[in-house]
Amino acid sequence: MRKTLPSNSILSEEVLLRRRENVFLILAGFFLSAMAILNLIGLTKFIQIGPLSVAVGILPYPLTFLCTDLISELYGRKRASFLVWVGLGMNGFILIILWLGHLIPAVSPERMPPWQLLSLAAPVSLPNGSIVEGSVELFQLISACTSGVVFASMVAYITAQFSDVYLFHFWKKLTQGRHLWLRNNGSTLISQFIDSFMVILITFGAAFSRGDIGFAALMNLFLGNYAFKLIAALLDTAPFYLGTYYLKHYLQAEQEIG
């Protein structure tokens, strides 16, 4: 019968390396999945959470900051920065696929599935500024809600995520490794503010300049976006503490793994 090793057992280098790489892969997988969900469903629906009105794509986004904070704490700044670059490349890949989808011609009308073309009862202004009426492809509607979000998130993402990683290690160095709550919340709250401001500005800036959306509505979008992320950031303090405590024992990592 296979015995379970106690938490303080010294594991072989092979087992320890496999554990550490598996945990990194899981955290990176959640990070990239949350980014993909944000970009794919983005502005396709706005939902009401208490007094907050937010885009449905934002729901998994706070998870990205928890993942980068855990990776920063366990694996160090280089690994966290590497994951941020991978996420940026993934955003670029999504834009390439959307571009190819527009470039490649659609199948002939007789071969189109019934859901490919939608009939609109009235003209609709899309997030990218175009106005469609009559029949429109489902892909056109989805990509109009997605492409702008992907571009905005790429700009905001690279700024906010690197700010998060930098600030996390700034607080960690300043407090000499103490006060987990400070580096977790201090880095996330500031970087989430940067992210919310840039995403709303880039995504809806053109609509605001055209007069399609007013200043009050723009501010409501920003405040709702940031308030949701702020609450989520505060709520993830407990999971961050638990994750750090458990994983440091599981990975036998008293210091950054690197």
Image (spheres, rainbow, N blue to C red):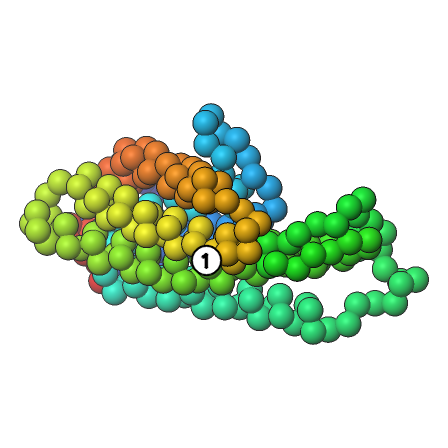
Which quadrant is home to the C terminus?
Answer: bottom left
* Circle 1 SS class: helix
Residue 26 appears left or right of 20: right
Residue drawn at the location 20% of the way across and 54% of the way down: 167
Q: Is residue 148 left or right of residue 28?
A: right
Q: Is residue 79 above or below residue 255?
A: below
**Is residue 73 positioned above or below 86 on the image?**
above
Horizontally, residue 29 falls left or right of residue 248, namely right
Q: Which picture quadrant has residue 178?
A: top left
Residue 19 makes an appearance in the image: no
Q: What residue is rendered at 66% in x and 59% in y? A: 130
Q: Quadrant of the N terminus?
A: top left
Expressed as whole percent of the image width and height from the top left, the position of residue 220 reads 44, 38
Q: Residues within 10 Å of mark 1 (few under 14, many from 20)?
A: some
Furthest residue in direction top, as rendered = 50
Q: Nearer the viewer, residue 210 or 42?
A: 210
Q: How many marks?
A: 1
x, y percentage for residue 117? 81, 54
Pick the residue in front: 124 or 54.
124
Residue at x-position 56% and y-position 39%:
46
Residue 194 place in picture, x, y as percent: 32, 52
Which of the two residues, 196 or 160, is positioned nearer the viewer here?
A: 196
The x and y percentages for residue 77 are 23, 61
Residue at left 69%, top 69%?
Answer: 102
- Asked if one can make out residue 101 in the rendered structure from this viewpoint, the answer is yes
Give the residue number, with chain letter if any, for mark 1.
202
Specify the amino acid type for callout 1.
Answer: Ile
